Amino acid sequence: MASSYVDSKTEIGSIFGTGSNAAYMERCSKIPKLADHHLPNDAFMAINCEYGAFDNSQGILPFTDYDAEIDRASPRPGQQRYEKMVAGFYLGEIFRLILLDLQNRKAIFDGQDTTKLSEPYVLDCSFLATIESDNSADLRASKDLFEKTLSIKPSPSELRFCYDLAHTISLRSARLYATGIAAIMKKRGLESCHVAVDGSVFNKYPCFPERAIGALKEILEWPADTPDPIQLIPAVDGSSVGAAVIASLISRSQS
């Protein structure tokens, strides 16, 4: 709502930070629940997707053992399965669970005190972002981060592995996020549009928008020699601005 107020090409609004969700405008004639309301065929309604709950039955998405562990330990097991795979709140925990599993197998951090690594959610998304932002030859910033946060001193090979692991987790997140946007595009029959995106992961995580666009190219099979038909546009403070726009519209309609 906030972005479409200033950008007529905006067809989808999305949030990707601690959680993940999207909204779009759908023709009322395409909404089965409104069939008995006899609304005009050209009328539109805002749809709140709440697609964080997609595939709660675990029949489609490629769940790993680490995803299953996060779900089991969560306050709502069996719910929000898609969101638990992609959203910023869970990325650090996925990273921690993998490291802890490897440490228990004596594959990494052998002989070191990993007490802090055993604490659930001791790592957040910014931990991964810092690692992926470390362009130094010896990954010094990453090494300092491990020592400060976990009291662990990784070897050079372990640091490189952790860098690759952070990249893999965030890449999976971006690609799965793109599937949600692509699904809306296909549902609406949209070939090009702007997608307004708010949220700390989208706005601050290194290369996240580029990775999402790369996935959209594959899913929607864009021609390689043409400009991207979909643009992901940052929408900072979209929630508050959108609420203000809606309040203004309601106020005007009632006056």
Image: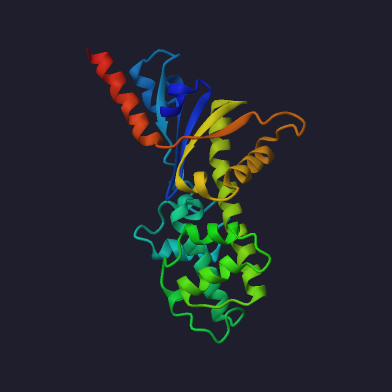
Q: Position of residue 150 (x, y in %)?
A: 47, 74
- The number of discs equals 0
Quarter that holds the N terminus? top left
| Above or below, 24 relative to 178 | above
Query: What residue appears at the point 45 percent right and 28 percent down from the top-left corner?
Result: 3
| Above or below, 48 relative to 112 | above
Task: Determine whether, in the image, residue 168 is placed left or right of residue 49.
Answer: right
The answer to whether residue 1 of the structure is visible from this angle is no
Query: What residue appears at the point 40 percent right and 53 percent down from the top-left corner?
Result: 79
Quarter that holds the C terminus? top left
Task: Determine whether, in the image, residue 65 is placed left or right of residue 25.
Answer: right
Query: What residue appears at the point 67 percent right and 31 percent down from the top-left corner?
Result: 228
Colour scheme employed for the rendering of this structure: rainbow
The residue closer to the viewer here, 225 or 129, is: 129
View extreme (left): residue:
255
Q: Where is residue 65 in the image (x, y as percent from the top left)?
A: 53, 66
Q: Position of residue 63 (x, y in %)?
A: 55, 58
The answer to whether residue 211 of the structure is visible from this angle is yes
| Above or below, 118 relative to 208 | below
The residue closer to the viewer here, 236 or 178, is: 236
Q: Where is residue 203 in the image (x, y as percent from the top left)?
A: 50, 44
| Above or below, 229 relative to 155 | above
View extreme (bottom): residue:
111
Task: Determine whether, in the image, residue 174 is placed left or right of residue 31.
Answer: right
Query: What residue appears at the point 39 percent right and 65 percent down from the top-left corner?
Result: 73
**Quarter assignment of residue 166:** bottom right
